[in-house]
Image (cartoon, rainbow, N blue to C red):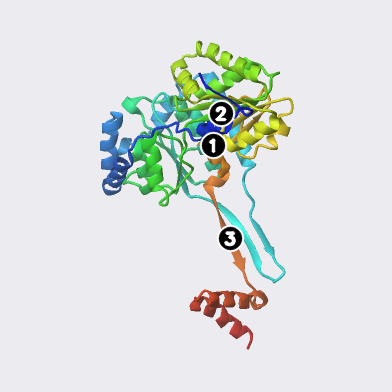
Amino acid sequence: MPLFLDTKDAGFEAGFAALLGMKREEAEDVDAAVAAIIAEVRARGDAAVIELTARYDRMELTPDRLAFSADEIAAEVAKVGAEERAALDLAAGRIRAYHQRQKPEDAMWTDAAGATLGWRWTPVSAAGLYVPGGTASYPSSVLMNAIPAKVAGVERLAICCPTPGGAVNPLVLLAAQLAGVDVVYRIGGAQAVAAMAYGTQTIAPVDKITGPGNAWVAAAKRRVFGRVGIDMIAGPSEVLVIATGEQDPDWVAIDLLSQAEHDESAQSILITPEAAFGRAVAAAVEARLETLPRRAIAGASWAQNGAVIVVRDLDEAAALSNRIAPEHLEILTPDPEAVAEHCVHAGAIFLGPFTPEAIGDYVGGPNHVLPTARSARFSSGLNVLDFMKRTTLARMTPEALKAIGPAAEALAASEGLQAHGLSVKARLDRLNR
């Protein structure tokens, strides 16, 4: 059974604090092993990647087979059925259209002192996307990671997707085609992250690495950060549903289970002002669990990490939501926009009963790579800006330097940086002759 809490109970704050502090993922202690793998790849390049791929993925490769050939991709893509192809094409189009609106504009202006100031946005030159491999890999994640990069203008985009035992998901390769990916490598794990970060004889290094992965991949991304940029270290998936009693309990139950079925560490929470409705949803979850192929996983997630919280009103629901800062927030109320105005910490918000979070996973348009583990308090989901950087521009005229230069000279002196001050003073002296 999930945790049941009521804000009117004396022990609510203690119970809610325990819910917020729940450690849902016991990550393997793999940092030392990952450090050794990265060192091997840096030292021996392709040879290390090939040996590690044979060890962990049971794949014997050669340097010329690290990447899928054009013929191999075409053969795999041909296996995709018409319905799945059309669905991926629809998703790609919607994701691309949404992210095109995120592109920032350059700016330039002249201020009152006569200085010309501004900024210019440019993409990173190369990005690498990690895609978990085998038949359980997710083509939707390829689209969500690769399309924003291409919209940003990234010149070269590479994918690393392991194929353990030779298992390939044709949909992943089709998604890569639709997103404009340049090369797909059939390698995974920490060795793939290291290869993308540092390069090998065959694999060119990138500037930013994005995409989900297991504890080994997460540890590798932490270790290469600084050498390259990364998107985030994602934790288990989570959904919070704020719902009132006129909603269909079965719909809410399915939405909760759509996250619970990801893995046993996922978390699904319902907040409602009506206790009877909360009990009805919990009963609907139990009934639906009996019908799910992944009921063992979803059931464990719901029993260990699930919660039903009864609140006094929707204002209190929004306040608790902000403390949870969920990855996904569904608002199923008569006026969801009004509630959403008060929900300032959430990765993505889904408004109304006909906007299930699962739409956002595939075809809604906004990105499904979102901050987890309460990090929505300070971070955003993956977007076009993640693949761009802003360069500031400044140009002083003689008059502008006369106007603001003395202040710079004074501040340099106050910080004891003589050459800083002299670099301004030399110019001012010539202008004042």
Q: Which comes before the other along the chain, label 1 or label 2?
A: 2
Q: How crowded is mark 1: few (under 14 residues within 10 Å), some or many (20 or more)?
A: many
Q: Which comes before the other along the chain, label 3 or label 1?
A: 1
Question: Can residue 272 be seen by looking at this rendering?
Answer: yes
Q: Nearer the viewer, residue 347 or 167?
A: 347
Give the residue type at disc 2: Val
- Report x, y in % for residue 128: 44, 42
Q: How crowded is mark 3: few (under 14 residues within 10 Å), some or many (20 or more)?
A: few
| Displayed quadrant of residue 309 | top right
| Quadrant in which the C terminus is drawn | bottom right
Q: Mark 3 points at which residue?
A: 392
Q: Name the residue under label 1.
A: 370
Q: Nearer the viewer, residue 128 or 77?
A: 128
| Displayed quadrant of residue 409 | bottom right
Give the residue type at disc 3: Thr
Q: Name the residue under label 2.
A: 239
Between tags 2 and 3, which lies in front? 2
Give the residue type at disc 1: Leu
State the separation of the CA atoms marked 3 and 1: 28 Å
- Report x, y in % for residue 313: 70, 29
Q: In this view, does 51 lie to the left or right of 310?
A: left
- Report x, y in % for residue 240: 58, 29
Say which element carries label 2. Answer: strand
Q: In this view, does 111 lie above or below 56?
A: below
Q: Residues within 10 Å of mark 2 (few under 14, many from 20)?
A: many
What is the count of numbered marks? 3
Say which element carries label 1. Answer: loop
Between tags 1 and 2, which lies in front? 2
